[in-house]
C-alpha cells in the first residue's frame, strides 16, 4: 500500500506558513495543524487547559472561563523558565494527539499529509516527516506582518520572534525553502511548482 508523502511545514512567526498550508490543502493534501490541535486541547476540561490552569492559576483564565491566550503568551515569551516549562509540559500533550491525527490522515491515502507545525525543529517533530519545507521571510517583514496582525509593541513582537529558533538555522535544516519575501502570487507559484515536483509528478495541478 502506497504511503502518502509526509511534509513537515514550518516557518517563523508571520512568515506566511498559513498561506502555504491553505494552498497545499487546495491542491489535495490533508493538513494536520499543531496550532488547531493545541487550541482544541486548550478548551475547558481538556488536558492542556488543566495543565495551564494548574501552573499559572486563575489569572490565566478569562471571565468567560476560557484560557487567556494573551496572558499565557506574555508569561511564556517573557521568561526562559516559563518557555522551558511549556516545552516540557504542553508539547508532549499535543504530540500524543498529533500522532493520532497523523495516523488517521495517512490511512485516508491522500497524495500528501502536511504537518503544519511552527516549532517543527524546536520540538523535534521533524522526525515524523519525510521531508521538511520552510516558509522564509526577513526579520523586518516578520515584524511588520506581526504588528499588523496582532498589534502591540515592536518590543513584544520582537521578543516573540526571538523566542523561536533563528530562521537561518531552520533554513539550514529544511529540505526545501519557500521564499516569501515578495508578492503572495510568487509564493503560491513556488508552492505549486514544489507540489508538482515532490508530490504530484504525473498529475495536473488543480
Image: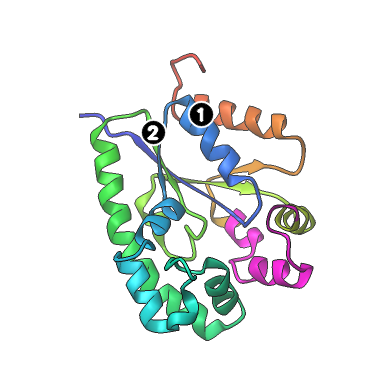
Q: Position of residue 89 (x, y in %)?
A: 37, 75
* Residue 38 higher or lower than 5, as above or below: below
Left or right: where 141 falls relative to 115: right
How far apart marks 2 and 1 lie (CA) works out to 9 Å
Q: Which residue lies at the image location 62% right of the left edge and 57% below the top edge?
A: 13
* Magenta-highlighted residues: 148-171
The total of numbered circles placed on residues is 2
Q: Residues within 10 Å of mark 2 (few under 14, many from 20)?
A: many
Q: Residues within 10 Å of mark 1 (few under 14, many from 20)?
A: many
Left or right: where 11 falls relative to 88: right
Please tell me which residue lies in front, 46 or 103. 46
Farthest front residue in view: 63
Farthest left residue in view: 1
Q: Which residue is mark 2?
A: 112
Q: Which residue is mark 1?
A: 195
Q: Position of residue 180 (x, y in %)?
A: 70, 42
Farthest top residue in view: 204
Tag 1 secondary structure: helix
Q: Are dots 2 and 1 in contact, CB under 8 Å?
A: yes
Q: Position of residue 188 (x, y in %)?
A: 63, 31
Please tell me which residue lies in front, 60 or 148. 60
Task: Give the quadrant of residue 199.
Answer: top left
* Residue 156 in magenta stretch: yes
* Residue 10 higher or lower than 107, as above or below: below
Task: Give the quadrant of residue 147.
Answer: bottom right
Q: Magenta: predominant secondary structure element?
A: helix
Q: Position of residue 192 (x, y in %)?
A: 57, 26
Amino acid at each position: 500500500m502506497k504511503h502518502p508523502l509526509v511534509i513537515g511545514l514550518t516557518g517563523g512567526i508571520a512568515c506566511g506558513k498559513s498561506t502555504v498550508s491553505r494552498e497545499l490543502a487546495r491542491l489535495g493534501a490533508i493538513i494536520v495543524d499543531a496550532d488547531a490541535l493545541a487550541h482544541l486541547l486548550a478548551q475547558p476540561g481538556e488536558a492542556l487547559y488543566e495543565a495551564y490552569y494548574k501552573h499559572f492559576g486563575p489569572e490565566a483564565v478569562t471571565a468567560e472561563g476560557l484560557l487567556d491566550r494573551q496572558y499565557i503568551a506574555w508569561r511564556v515569551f517573557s521568561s526562559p523558565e516559563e518557555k522551558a516549562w511549556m516545552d516540557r509540559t504542553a508539547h508532549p500533550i499535543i504530540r500524543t494527539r498529533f500522532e493520532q491525527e497523523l495516523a488517521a490522515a495517512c490511512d485516508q491515502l491522500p497524495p500528501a499529509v502536511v504537518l503544519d507545525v511552527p516549532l517543527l525543529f524546536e520540538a523535534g517533530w521533524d522526525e515524523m516527516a519525510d521531508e521538511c519545507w520552510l516558509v522564509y521571510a526577513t526579520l523586518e517583514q516578520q515584524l511588520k506582518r506581526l504588528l499588523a496582525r496582532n498589534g502591540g509593541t515592536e518590543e513584544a513582537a520582537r521578543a516573540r520572534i526571538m523566542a523561536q529558533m533563528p530562521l537561518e538555522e531552520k533554513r539550514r535544516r529544511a529540505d526545501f525553502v519557500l521564499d516569501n519575501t515578495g508578492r503572495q502570487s510568487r509564493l503560491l507559484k513556488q508552492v505549486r511548482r514544489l507540489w508538482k515536483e515532490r508530490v504530484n509528478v504525473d498529475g495536473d495541478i488543480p
